[in-house]
Image (spheres, helix red, strand yellow):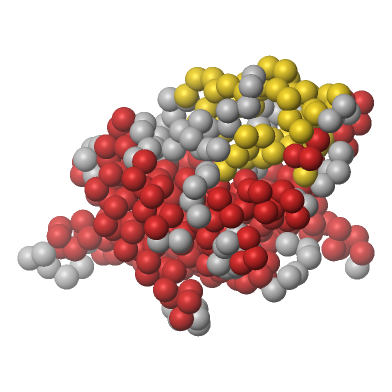
Amino acid sequence: MDYFFTEEQKKWREKASHIAEQYLLPASIKSDEEQSFPAEIVEIFAKNDLFRVLVPEEYGGSGDTVLNLCLIVEALSRIDGGLALLLAVTGLATIPIASFGNEEQKKKYLPDIAAGKKLAAFALTEANAGSDVSAIKTRAEKKGDFYIINGSKQWISNGGIADVYTVFVNTDIERGARGLSALIVEKGTEGFEFGKKENKMGIRANPTRELIFTDVKVPVENLLGKEGMGFLIAMKTFDYSRPGVASQALGIAQGAFDLAAKNYVKMKKGKEEGDFQGMEFLLAEMATKIEAARCLIYQTARTIDSGAKNISEISSMSKLYASDLAMEITTDAIQLMGENGYIKENLVEKMFRDAKVTQIYEGTNQIQKEIIALKLLKKYLRA
């Protein structure tokens, strides 16, 4: 379909596709097996200005749109969703600074993120506080000019390799969700350590680590917004970031479909027309659903870029639909390819494992359904 992209949008998509084919593809299987992130990929992303897409122009970025980021993440994820996650997570952690940070915070952190000199991570989840953000136990007690942080975060993507962490803490335990605040914490701060590296099913190239805070002193000027704004900051961030997760899922789905379709063409050579009609129908259904997801994601991104305020519903819809579809498409792709799809030498097996987490992080799909349902019911209650 023609999505009427600008020349700039076409340029970003083509650049990301080139990087994926030339650099991510050769590194994909090895980085998955070894659970290692190739340091040179960070340099390649930086050299090609991909990190600048995350940051406003006045702070060294290219001031690009949510749609542009979605195009880039989709193109990278078409080859490797785990390696693409580095960029997406840095974007996730950058949104709170760009949206809620003061001028000093933006000047201090955003230029280095834009240049690829510093990576970022988003630290919200805890062992007993995943979908229920109000259950966060990591405490930050204000003492003079510092906050003293104690607690831990779990399953943090970019953990250990990121330099800047947007950390959500409880500054008033009595107020529940209204007692949450967001602090910027730098790697290397005394008392801030990294726990075990998770041995994951998918997106294994991206390090997922535990973050441990023991009497970590963070200057009060590192507070984003005001005390008690943490829940709002987290939810607003997800409204803007969920199309990125949807794009990762879409890219994985498209990549798996490409492999299955190519495998089918090889199988069909020399066979009679109609011998594989059932497979052809399945490919037709897969392609139609992928295009439907693409339409939803691009329209969601364009809606956000227009400045629309009420975006929670459509943002959740795009994440819900695309991530469920990624699991469906990768499963069907393996089935179509038979034994070829089941072996690790073929990337479709990896794509199947990578797809699963898109249904889980940045709010499980059950949470997305709850958000969508609440927004729908409010509309009908007002009618």
Where on the picture, by quarter, is residue 362? top right
The N terminus, quarter of image = bottom left
Residue at point 52%, 27% (across, down): 209
Residue at point 50%, 55% (across, down): 115
Residue 312 is situated, as x and y percent measured from the top left of the image, at: 73, 57
Residue at point 28%, 44% (across, down): 27
Where on the picture, by quarter, is residue 200? top left
Residue 261 is situated, as x and y percent measured from the top left of the image, at: 27, 61
Left/right placement of residue 91 relative to residue 277 reads right
Q: Nearer the viewer, residue 383 or 215?
A: 215
Residue 123 vertical placement versus 289 (above, below): above
Residue 366 is situated, as x and y percent measured from the top left of the image, at: 66, 42
Q: Nearer the viewer, residue 188 or 371?
A: 188
Residue at point 82%, 47% (across, down): 225
Where on the picture, by quarter, is residue 295? bottom right
Residue 353 in view, yes or no? no
Left/right placement of residue 104 relative to residue 75 reads right
The C terminus, quarter of image = bottom right
Residue 216 is situated, as x and y percent measured from the top left of the image, at: 70, 22
Q: Nearer the viewer, residue 217 or 13?
A: 217
Q: Farthest left residue? A: 270
Residue 172 in view, yes or no? yes
Q: How many marks?
A: 0
